Amino acid sequence: MPSRPLSPHGTFSIVAWDPQRGEWGVAVQSKFIAAGAVVPWGQARIGVLATQAMSDGSQGPKGLEMLREGFSASEVVQRLSREAPDREDLQFGVVDGKGRAAAFTGTRCLDWAGHVVGKGYACQGNILFSAEVVQAMARSYETTPGDLPERLLAALVAGQREGGDRRGMQSAALLVWKERGGYRGGLDRWIDVRVDDHPTPIEELDRIFRIYDMTLLAREDPTTLLPFTPETVMAVQRSLGVLGYLLGPKSGTWDAATTTAFAKFVSEHNFENKVRTDQMIWPSMVRYLEQQSTEELSRRETTAPIRPGALDQGPGAPGAHPPAPPGGGAPSSTPAREKPVHRRRSK
């Protein structure tokens, strides 16, 4: 039976653990479509894996099950590599639930291929520009301040600056597991951001993560929280007014109308995870409101109206969207006062 043709899979990744915050994460970049769908595997309190090179995808679930059964990172690496018939074409990085790290690089992984294992993390890669890629990742991870996602992203940037995957760039991903850290506490998958195909995937990953962070996470320094001073409340009210959520005069006092308007804004912009009940607000939410209101004002000055009064209303205003016609179907964009023009057909 002829052997199956092999195509080179070049990738660099980092698996890591933050003991203070109880977080396990994986970050990856590759000249391979949607690497985030096949490389990272993990579970809070259990551990994380990166399976790459010529992995067929089965090693991730197998390794995760071993971690659930209590095997250490080194034992998982040993068993995965021993049981695979094409072990020398595979590469793994593993951190277990106790923060122990291990990695494996098969001898047939294409140059440059190798790994660096440190305290609570492992960096690994194949078809890289040089060994300096994983070494730079390790240095950056160890020296970058901040929490786990910031350090993982910094490691990717450092690896790419040293040449990264020598075939180029295509996809990147950042996944972090934290017990009940997901949206509304229903999942352990705290962060799951992926770029499947992009000329500069790490930069795009960082851009998307900043939006994800601002909307869904509560990672900001609590010392930066803004109290409901008249100045802060007035800024929020002005933005809510421009966007159509708050009508009438603005008082600088967080009254019942402001509470209702702000709640509607939060629900429509997916800020539920950042709502507070202590008369404080995250500065990122104030900045986001100001940005949205600035864009809304610009739209009113540069966009032709599609119906009467449209430019005078923000997207949160009552009746901002025309009602559906009786019997269903899409609402008409034709102003009510306009009448259809009938033309005589020529012969």
Image (tube, rainbow, N blue to C red):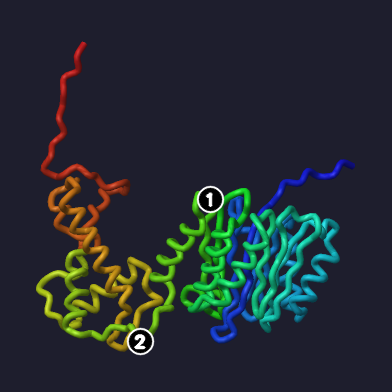
Total marks shown come to: 2
Identity, as a three-letter code, of the amino acid under mark 2: Thr
93 w.r.t. 120: above or below: above
Residue furthest to the right? 1
Secondary structure of the residue carrying numbered label 2:
helix
- Crowding at dot 2, Cα within 10 Å, few <14 / some 14-19 / many 20+, comes out as few
68 w.r.t. 244: above or below: below
Residue furthest to the bottom? 278
- Crowding at dot 1, Cα within 10 Å, few <14 / some 14-19 / many 20+, comes out as some
Q: Is residue 111 left or right of residue 12?
A: right
Q: Position of residue 130 (x, y in %)?
A: 66, 58
Q: Tell me, for residue 223, which label it has, or none.
A: 2
Question: What is the quadrant of residue 125 in the picture?
Answer: bottom right
Residue furthest to the top? 347
Secondary structure of the residue carrying numbered label 1:
loop
Q: Is residue 103 left or right of residue 218?
A: right
Q: CA distance from mark 1 to mark 2?
A: 38 Å
Question: What is the quadrant of residue 14 in the picture?
Answer: bottom right
Task: Work out whether residue 141 or residue 345 is closer to the camera in this orientation and state it.
Answer: 141
Circle 1 residue:
197
Rendered-image quadrant of the N terminus: top right
Task: Work out whether residue 273 or residue 339 is closer to the camera in this orientation and state it.
Answer: 273
Identity, as a three-letter code, of the amino acid under mark 1: Asp
Q: Position of residue 106 (x, y in %)?
A: 79, 60
Question: What is the quadrant of residue 132 in the picture?
Answer: bottom right
